[in-house]
């Protein structure tokens, strides 16, 4: 029975990693938000800021999560890219439901002693408004068209790193704004190492440098920081709501969002079950 539970937990972390890695490449979807959704964000910040203390606690989790992320980011890149190209609205609705399905759980774990203070609410509202303003500015601006080379791949990695450290900051949206998104996805799918290596290096540098700051915020102001993260998650979700061409597409979108919502609830139950056992 114990081996069965370990296998279930490993499978859960692999599935979570696949969804984080595959979902993070969708335009508008934040890898950091997905880390929050699957309970990986806080341990990841702790791991990056205090590796000696955290590896004994989380090595099993991250072994399987990183396997899943690798499968999702590289192995699923082409599949997700093709699905998004053909069914953009449907894919976005599915992910909207998936993220919204975890918000009640996020709010529950964010509360200090079961209470929500005025400071917690303010942190949520400010984070929501700040991210919405940033995303609106990006949408209104003129898109650039930068060439893809090791230097711009490294810059893209820095952007991706910030999207992991700051949940809700969508690296995909920023890369689309710079004209690099399609180029990077093509080269990652083809395993072009002259692009993949500087991209990963940029992600790693930002993650290591800023994770300790985030970890300290959570240690000293857990409830406020957690509510701010919920605000970022909600803003990121609102920002990817698509425009529907007709009523039929609207109902299809609602149905897919409901499927995503129910899937998120089942994943939450699965996670609670395997961790409890």
Image: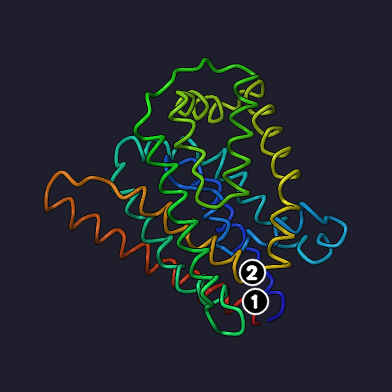
- Residue that sits furthest to the bottom in the current view: 114
From the viewer's perspective, tell me whether residue 218 is left or right of residue 127.
right
Reply above or below: 199 against 231: above
From the viewer's perspective, tell me whether residue 127 is left or right of residue 6.
left
On the image, numbered disc 1 is attached to which residue?
275
* Disc ID at residue 153: none
Q: Nearer the viewer, mark 1 or mark 2?
A: 1
Residue 117 place in picture, x, y as percent: 54, 77
Residue 87 place in picture, x, y as percent: 29, 42
Residue 5 vs residue 30, the one in the foreground = 30
Image point (45%, 17%), residue name: 145
Quadrant location, the C terminus: bottom right
> Pointer 1 and pointer 2: residues touching (CB < 8 Å)?
yes
Image point (41%, 61%), residue name: 98
From the viewer's perspective, tell me whether residue 138 is left or right of residue 224.
left
Image point (56%, 77%), residue name: 111
Q: Residues within 10 Å of mark 1 (few under 14, many from 20)?
A: few
- Location of residue 197 (image quadrant): top right
| Secondary structure type for disc 1 | helix
Q: Residues within 10 Å of mark 2 (few under 14, many from 20)?
A: many
Reply above or below: 22 against 254: above
* Mark-to-mark CA distance, 1 and 2: 7 Å
Quadrant location, the N terminus: bottom right
On the image, numbered disc 2 is attached to which residue?
9
Image point (66%, 50%), residue name: 67
């Amino acid at each position: 029975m114990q081996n069965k539970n370990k296998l279930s937990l490993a499978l859960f972390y692999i599935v979570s990693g696949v969804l984080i890695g595959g979902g993070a490449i969708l335009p508008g979807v934040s890898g950091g938000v997905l880390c929050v959704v699957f309970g990986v964000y806080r341990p990841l910040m702790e791991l990056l800021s205090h590796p000696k203390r955290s590896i004994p606690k989380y090595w099993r989790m991250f072994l399987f999560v990183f396997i899943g992320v690798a499968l999702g980011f590289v192995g699923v890149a082409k599949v997700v890219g093709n699905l998004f190209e053909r069914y953009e609205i449907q894919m976005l609705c599915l992910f909207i439901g998936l993220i919204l399905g975890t918000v009640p759980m996020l709010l529950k774990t964010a509360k200090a002693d079961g209470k929500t203070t005025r400071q917690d609410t303010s942190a949520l509202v400010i984070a929501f408004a700040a991210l919405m303003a940033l995303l609106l500015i990006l949408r209104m601006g003129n898109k650039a068209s930068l060439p893809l080379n090791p230097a711009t791949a490294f810059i893209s990695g820095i952007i991706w790193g910030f999207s992991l450290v700051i949940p809700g900051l969508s690296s995909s949206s920023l890369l689309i704004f710079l004209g690099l998104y399609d180029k990077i996805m093509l080269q990652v799918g083809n395993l072009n190492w002259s692009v993949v290596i500087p991209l990963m290096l940029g992600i790693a540098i930002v993650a290591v440098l800023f994770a300790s700051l985030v970890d300290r915020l959570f240690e000293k102001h857990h409830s406020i920081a957690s509510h701010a993260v919920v605000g970022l998650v909600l803003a990121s979700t609102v920002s990817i709501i698509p425009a529907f061409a007709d009523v039929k597409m609207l109902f299809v979108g609602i149905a897919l969002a409901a499927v995503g919502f129910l899937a998120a609830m089942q994943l939450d139950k699965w996670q609670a079950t395997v961790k409890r056992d």
